[in-house]
Image: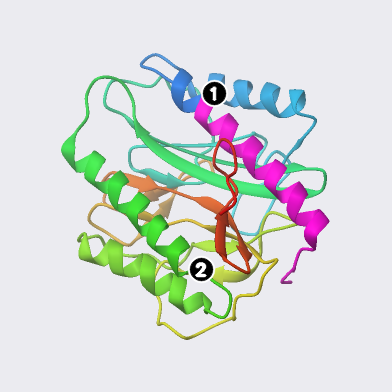
Amino acid sequence: MIEILNAAELARARASGALVGRILQELTSRVTVGTNLLEIDQWVQVMIAEAGAQSCYVDYAPSFGRGPFGHYVCTSVNDAVLHGLPHDYTLADGDLLSLDLAVSLDGIAADSAVSVVVGAAQPSESMAMIDATRRALSAGIAAARPGAHIGDISHAIGAVLTEAGYPVNTDFGGHGIGSTMHQDPHVPNTGRPGRGYQLRPGLLLALEPWVMADTDRLVTDADGWTLRSATGCRTAHSEHTIAITDRGADILTLPAAIAR
């Protein structure tokens, strides 16, 4: 299903996106050495409830997971890159933490992810990998305009990741979003320009470049959810929900969504 939102729905999407952005901003400011992943999950549960919103994760039970997910935020550490199931783990100095959050407010969902290094240690390899995903995300957003194609976004993302020296996995990528969290079209993190669905104003997309330092192969953790690099290397993940408008792409999941 591909949804095209009307003006009223887009206004609600902006509110959802701003909420997701604010929660992630607060999490990254609060997380420190000694924070437990279950503590982060509890913070998110409270913030969602206080906003009168609904979690897109807690009851989520897709075919690729051992559902329902049962938690409110994905917490992926070091070699974990996607769908990290919160568990009893205390963050250490230098851990690379990826937080992925999707929330629905007034019937419209928004989805965003951020990777950070915890504590004073800032390993150059980890920082470079995070930077590559952020630059790839910016390139994908720049390519998202009316009349362009999904392949244009995928190509822009993949070009940055490949040039930075990272293998690109296409099993999981970006996606349409709206009244539900995961919709068509699928947005791979590499592709051929001019191919795929043609973008229209009112379309929401969650773009999410993610990489593993030295492999494109994933393995599933024993918890049935967490996806890790097959070699145990570190990983990084960046994501924003955007709205296609007549002028281009608006990023909705900034702490205060700014239309341009």
Q: Which of the two discs, 2 and 1, labels the residue nearer the N terminus?
A: 1
User: Given the image, on which type of amino acid does mark 2 rest?
Assistant: Ala
| For residue 63, above or below residue 23 | below
Q: Quadrant of residue 163?
A: bottom left
**Residue to which mark 2 is pinned:** 144
CA gap, disc 2 and disc 1? 32 Å
The segment highlighted magenta reads 1-26
Q: For this rendering, which residue is in front, 216 or 46?
A: 46
Q: Which part of the image, by quadrant, shows the C terminus?
A: bottom right
> Regarding mark 2 in the picture, which secondary structure is present there?
loop
Instruction: Return the residue found at the far left.
Output: 124
Residue 28 vertical placement versus 179 (above, below): above
**Residue annotated with mark 1:** 40
Residue 121 in the image, given as x and y percentages of width and height: 22, 24
Per the picture, the main secondary structure of the magenta-coloured stretch is helix
Q: Nearer the viewer, mark 2 or mark 1?
A: 2
The reply to whether callout 2 and callout 1 are in contact (CB within 8 Å) is: no
Q: Amino acid at mark 1?
A: Ile
Residue 21: say if magenta.
yes
Q: Residue 68, can we see it?
A: no
Whether residue 33 appears in magenta in the rendering, the answer is no
- Secondary structure at numbered mark 1: helix
Q: What percent of the width, then of the height, locates residue 70?
A: 67, 36
Q: Residue at x 44, y 76 (%)?
A: 152
Report the side of 1 relative to 121 (left or right): right
How many residues crowd around disc 1 within 10 Å: few (fewer than 14), some, or many (20 or more)? Answer: many
216 vs 39, left or right, is: left
Q: Is residue 4 left or right of residue 36?
A: right
Query: Which image quadrant for residue 232?
Result: top left
